[in-house]
């Protein structure tokens, strides 16, 4: 590091970023002792950093275990970063090719609180009445992309999203109980694929898979929307979406 870089470096900010990097790369929530040991920092100092980050939403604490994980504010930064990057531009050719092959609409979305924001879309004329444009935000709990992305959050963060009120009901199949939603998201996290059937709109079926970077971090969700009458086998469609997501990530890594 150059002398100038050392002059301008803010030590406490560097340590805070070290904490965030550690939590982002950890296999699961971390205790204060684990974080302190990994970073070789005093427990009191780490605790103050964690609590400061927690006040701003960048870190979440899971009780009663009192472990720490990345908070929802980090997702907000990720959403802004994706919008600033060329992810949608790079993804679109792959999405259009898959849309034409499957003859279904393909979408790319990121999580914004209780909503999923559409950042790229390859529509197909067979999609039924739902009109979706770039920038459209739909309730995350009732969409395949939204559920896939909510499933990446710690369960306490999911509950915090709906602290002010339960999820809205759109059809008889919409999950509106938070406990039921959390259990449902747990299963999605294990399968690494989300499927919805008439939860946002009657007659509409959807499936979503994650778009992960080289470190395994979920950048966005990729989905296919299909009229329920033509519903394909999820086990057959998921690999096609996953392959498309992998091609997008490969192009991103190559700097295309």
Image (spheres, rainbow, N blue to C red):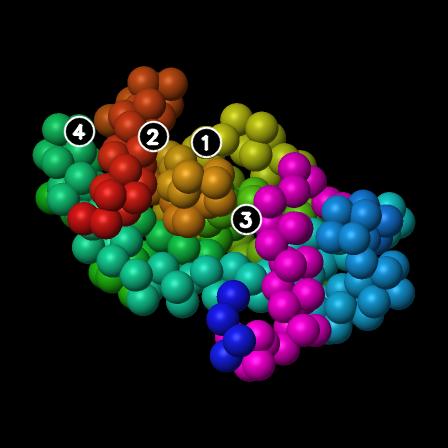
Q: Is residue 55 left or right of residue 210?
A: right
Mark before the other along the chain sequence, 2 or 3: 3
Nearest to N terminus: mark 4 or mark 2: 4
Task: Tell me which numbered mark, 2 or 1, is placed earlier along the sequence.
Answer: 1
Give the structural element (helix, strand or loop) at label 4.
helix
Q: Answer yes or no: do the residues labelled 3 and 4 have beta carbons within 8 Å?
A: no
The one nearer the camera, 12 or 211, is 12
- Percent x, y for residue 119? 29, 58
- Residue bearing the label numbered 1: 193
Q: Residues within 10 Å of mark 4 (few under 14, many from 20)?
A: some
| Magenta range | 5-30
Residue closest to the eye, 153 or 181:
153
Is residue 213 rendered to the left or right of residue 19?
left
Q: Residue at x 14, y 44 (%)?
A: 93
Name the outermost residue toward the front.
3
- Rounded to the nearest whole Å, what is the CA distance between mark 4 and mark 2? 14 Å
Q: CA distance from mark 1 to mark 4?
A: 18 Å
Q: CA distance from mark 2 to mark 3?
A: 18 Å
| Spatial CA span between label 2 and label 1 | 9 Å
Q: Secondary structure at mark 3?
A: helix
Q: Are marks 2 and 1 in contact (CB under 8 Å)?
A: no
Q: Which residue is mark 4?
A: 102
Q: Which residue is mark 3?
A: 150
Q: Is residue 227 above or below residue 155?
A: above
Which of the marked residues, 3 or 4, is nearer the chain's N terminus? 4
Q: CA distance from mark 3 to mark 4?
A: 26 Å
Whichever of callouts 1 and 4 sits on the residue coming sooner in the sequence is 4
> Residue at 17% across / 33% down in the picture?
98
Q: Report whether residue 175 is seen.
A: no
- Could you say whether the residue bearing mark 2 is in a helix, strand or loop? helix
Q: Which residue is mark 2?
A: 242
């Amino acid at each position: 590091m150059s002398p100038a870089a050392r002059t301008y470096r803010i030590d406490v900010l560097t340590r805070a970023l070290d904490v965030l990097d550690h939590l982002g790369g950890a296999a699961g929530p971390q205790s204060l002792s684990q974080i302190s040991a990994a970073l070789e920092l005093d427990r009191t100092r780490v605790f103050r950093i964690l609590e400061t980050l927690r006040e701003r939403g960048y870190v979440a604490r899971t009780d009663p275990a009192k472990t720490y994980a990345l908070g929802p504010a980090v997702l907000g930064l990720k959403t802004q970063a994706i919008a600033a990057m060329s992810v949608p531009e790079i993804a679109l050719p792959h999405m259009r090719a898959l849309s034409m092959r499957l003859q279904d609409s393909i979408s790319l979305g990121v999580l914004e609180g209780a909503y999923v924001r559409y950042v790229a879309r390859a529509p197909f004329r067979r999609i039924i009445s739902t009109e979706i444009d770039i920038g459209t935000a739909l309730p995350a709990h009732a969409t395949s992309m939204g559920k896939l992305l909510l499933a990446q959050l710690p369960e306490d963060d999911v509950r915090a999203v709906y602290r002010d009120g339960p999820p809205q009901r759109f059809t008889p199949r919409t999950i509106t109980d938070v406990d039921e939603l959390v259990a449902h998201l747990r299963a999605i996290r294990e399968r690494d694929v989300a499927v919805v059937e008439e939860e946002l709109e009657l007659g509409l079926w959807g499936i979503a898979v994650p778009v992960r970077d080289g470190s395994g971090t979920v950048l966005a969700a990729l989905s296919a929307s299909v009229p329920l009458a033509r519903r394909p086998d999820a086990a057959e469609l998921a690999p096609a979406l996953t392959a498309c997501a992998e091609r997008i990530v490969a192009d991103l890594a190559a700097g295309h």
